[in-house]
Amino acid sequence: MPLMDITNPAVIIFLKENYEKENRLRLNWIFKHREKIQQAATLTREPTNYFESDVIAHNMIEGMATITRDHVVAGYNRRKVPIRDGTSIPGVAHLRHGNSIADIGLGDPKLDERLVRSDEETTTDPIMRPIDPQTKEIIYKPKPEYGRLTYLEKRSKTWPEKKYYFSECNNWDYGWRMGDSALRQKPVFGRCWHLTRTLRTRVGPQPDPPHYKSSDPPGPIIKRFKLSYVVSLE
């Protein structure tokens, strides 16, 4: 809705009449409820002269009974002996026993010597798998055929699951160790090159199977042609 032009004389007269109408309605409401307004505005009780601090202190005094009760209950509960579900708290050695990388079959101690540890050792398992010695020698050879950039480029072509024991970031969750999945099989209705597969076969191209053809109506073919000829003559 466009704004009104307050410089227009007709608009000025319209606004003035609405202001006067609103003032008359307000005065009528005041005259109608004058007795109720005077009764509500008159103080009919003795003044207490309370301050804000007096109201806060009153609320605090009312809550002291609850604080005292809770303090007694808390003191009674503190004297109770806690119930222990277990007799001992397991440490790192207990958690790692049977759950290390070598125990669950993710790493071979023969390939990674860091996995060969005693049960009393509490160090954590390694994060990365051992690097191929031939790949590791690239970084120590002279440039430009070798060096740090060549080493990083070759390492980038290796799958993350071949470099790390576990998925270290969320981007590796998709496709991590897909070879272990039993669902990794060739799709039954996947796309295939029919022409290339047909031409490269030993027997060569073959006709379409019977279920690819359109279905014929029942009855001999000769009778069907005769019937259609008679119908066309009629």
Image (cartoon, grey):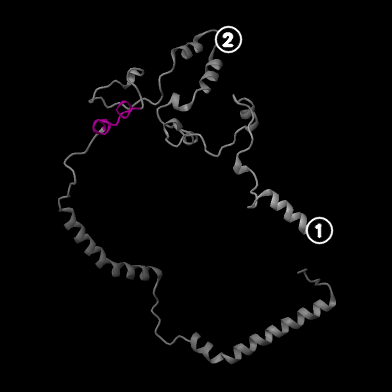
Residue 5: in magenta span: no
Q: Position of residue 116 (x, y in %)?
A: 29, 20
Query: Overall secondary structure of the magenta stretch?
Result: helix
Quadrant that contains the C terminus? bottom right
User: Residue at (49%, 10%) from the top-left corner?
Assistant: 140
Vertical side of 233 occupied by 102: above or below? above
Label 2: which secondary element? loop
Q: Nearer the viewer, residue 112 or 152?
A: 112
Q: Residues within 10 Å of mark 1 (few under 14, many from 20)?
A: few
Q: Nearer the viewer, residue 113 or 56?
A: 113
Q: Nearer the viewer, residue 153 or 185?
A: 185
Badge number at residue 145: 2
Mark 1 residue type? Leu
Query: Mark 1 — residue?
Result: 233
Q: Residue furthest right?
A: 9
Vertical side of 131 occupied by 63: above or below? below
State which quadrant residue 206 falls in: top right
Vertical side of 194 occupied by 113: above or below? above
Quadrant that contains the N terminus? bottom right
Mark 2 residue type? Glu
State which quadrant residue 16 falls in: bottom right
User: Residue at (78%, 80%) from the top-left corner?
Assistant: 14
The answer for how far apart the CA atoms under marks 2 and 1 are is 89 Å
User: Residue at (53%, 23%) from the top-left corner?
Assistant: 156
Which comes sooner in the sequence, label 2 or label 1? 2
Name the side, left or right, on which 184 lies relative to 113: right
Name the side, left or right, on which 93 lies relative to 28: left
Callout count: 2
